[in-house]
Amino acid sequence: MRRMIGAACAALMFAGAAAAQEQRPNIVLIVADDVGFTDFGAYGGEARTPHIDALAREGAQFTRYYTSPLCAPSRAMLLTGVDNHRTGLATIPEVLPPEHVGRPGYTMALEPGVETVALRLRDAGYRTYMTGKWHLGHERGDLPNAHGFERSFALDASGADNWEQRPYMPYYANAPWFEDGRPARLPRDFYSSAFIVDQMIRYLERAETEAPFFAYLAFQAVHIPVQAPAEFTAPYRDAYVSGWDALRLARHARAQTLGLIPTDAPAPRFHPRMRAWDAVTADEQALYARSMAVHAGMLDAMDHHIGRFIAYLGARGALDNTLIIVTSDNGPEPSNPLNERGFAQWMALHGYTRDLANLGERRSYVFIGPEFASATSSPGSLFKFYASGGGLHAPLVIAGPGVDAQRIAAPAFVTDVAPTILDYAGLSPQAREGAQAISGRSMRTALEGAAALIHPADHAVGIEVSGNAALFRGDYKLVRNMPPYGDGRWRLFNIAADPGETRDLAGAQPALFAEMQAAYAAYAAENGVLSLPEGYDVHRQIARNTLAKMAAHYWWALALIVLILAGLLYFVARLIGALLFRRRSVAR
């Protein structure tokens, strides 16, 4: 039955769109977490995503949309149109070195003068709601209610359990959910994708006005822990048994067949650190293949609940005048948490298992690892954290009134979404006086078929997060990836012809290489990009920051342990003293 919602939603959505042109549209911004460029069905993925696919067919499907390689910087840019270093979210707190703490652009929260689209829309009379992942700070004045959202139910963490209010890594003592800026508890029947939609519907139902609305739904799918109800995972149990080598090539071939990349684009190479599928034990193969089935099931479940939301809007008569944007914050998650010291013990302490019998369900902990992450990012290379295509190249679908059904191959960037939203709402796509300047450009003329390009061909756009950096100009991309999967060297690629970044052109086109290096240096200087401290290692930094967080969370327990130990030492010292005194007395 749930599969039938897609066709009905598509028909409801676009019937009568012309009549709604003169009204200010409702705007729905849907953000998936760690979804790769080819994960949705419309982009060649194995998961069934009929509702997102319907939007892609009836609206604009972007083939060259780029974001940042990490969640908080992407979300900050998505909501503001401002470069992440100017928002305060240059990176994420988990990897921030102490040398950068508190520096301008590195405060790990939206800084003064940074305005979200929610704030602009609310001031223009829109209702503004947010449900799901925030990760832009939760100190006083940091949460969605302080940044333009009238109602919000937000998770301020990089991730959390999808079944219960539980943390997903030792960095967090709990899963910090907030409603309207106050700590909140989740319902007993919580499942993240269902709850995010249900709560948004509750906010819309309780509205006392018919003013247009802005709804921001930020899903946890498919961030670790990857979790999904068994009914969604079941159809994919045998879909990944051929392994990651086969999946990488299959995704690349489907991207060619669908016209997402050129038919002669070379397939990306696996990084030398990756294991071959046939080098993995049979038990590991079974676990990884089933983990990918849960990954597909979680995408399927998210799409199902998006379909429920679209159907709700249709039933209310709001769909004809609603602009819907669907995207991802960055590429696939490569982490294998069990490689981190002490994680297996933390997992066991919190009651998590990795049993095949209930993989993806309550109290199970699932991740797909670097090899499958690299395969799901194909036709790009690498994955989340890195500035290669696998980290930055993401899906983007925009559908609704005034949007032509089309493929858009013009380069577009995460900072372009906010000015586009403002433009469709009838507001200036530029920042208000006194606010941080918007870096992006409205995509409206391209969406309505009036322009072939969004940015001039010679316009340079920079991205940097924790040393991983890129500069885009026309068909060319300058890129630098840091260890452990990079070497810190700059390389040059024509990503229109070579989206897998297999042919470094730095030696063949030295003049262009030098020009783009100079352009990146100008971008970094203009936006206050800080250099990494000498010897910076992202994994060591996560470990150090986690230990510091745990010490802050559990200082009382550490103090109690110190007091107990001090008491024991005092008792032992007194006992030894008493024994020595007795010996001396006997000797006399």
Image: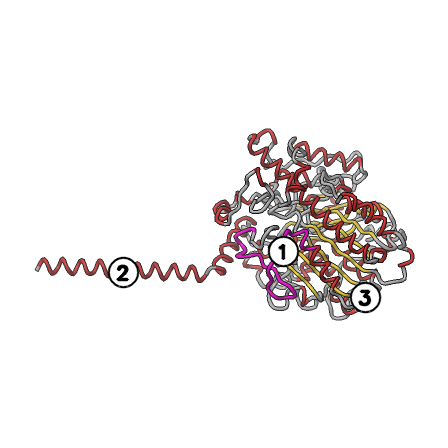
Apparent side of residue 173 relative to residue 179 in the rendered image (left or right) = left
Q: Would you say residue 188 sits in the magenta stretch?
A: yes
Query: Which amino acid type corresponds to the residue marked 2 in the rendered image?
Result: Phe
Choose top left, top right, bottom left or bottom right for residue 133. bottom right
x and y percentages locating residue 262 in the rendered image: 80, 37
Residue farthest front in this picture: 1
For the residue carrying disc 1, how many other residues have a C-alpha within 10 Å: few (<14), some (14-19), or many (20+)?
A: many
Foreground mark, 1 or 2? 2
x and y percentages locating residue 261 in the rendered image: 78, 39
Say what secondary structure mark 3 lies in.
loop
Disc number placed over residue 571 in the picture, else none = 2
How far is disc 1 from disc 3 in space, using C-alphas? 38 Å
For the residue carrying disc 2, how many other residues have a C-alpha within 10 Å: few (<14), some (14-19), or many (20+)?
A: few
Foreground mark, 1 or 3? 3
216 or 452: nearer the eye? 216
Query: Would you say residue 488 is visible in this rendering?
Result: no
Q: Which residues are magenta?
A: 168-196
Apparent side of residue 296 relative to residue 562 in the rendered image (left or right) = right
Q: Residue placed at 51% from the left, 53% from the top?
A: 544
Query: Which amino acid type corresponds to the residue marked 1 in the rendered image?
Result: Thr
267 or 283: nearer the eye? 283
Disc number placed over residue 91 in the picture, else none = 1
Q: Residue placed at 66% from the left, 48% from the top?
A: 221
Disc number placed over residue 210 in the picture, else none = 3
How far is disc 3 from disc 2 in space, using C-alphas? 72 Å
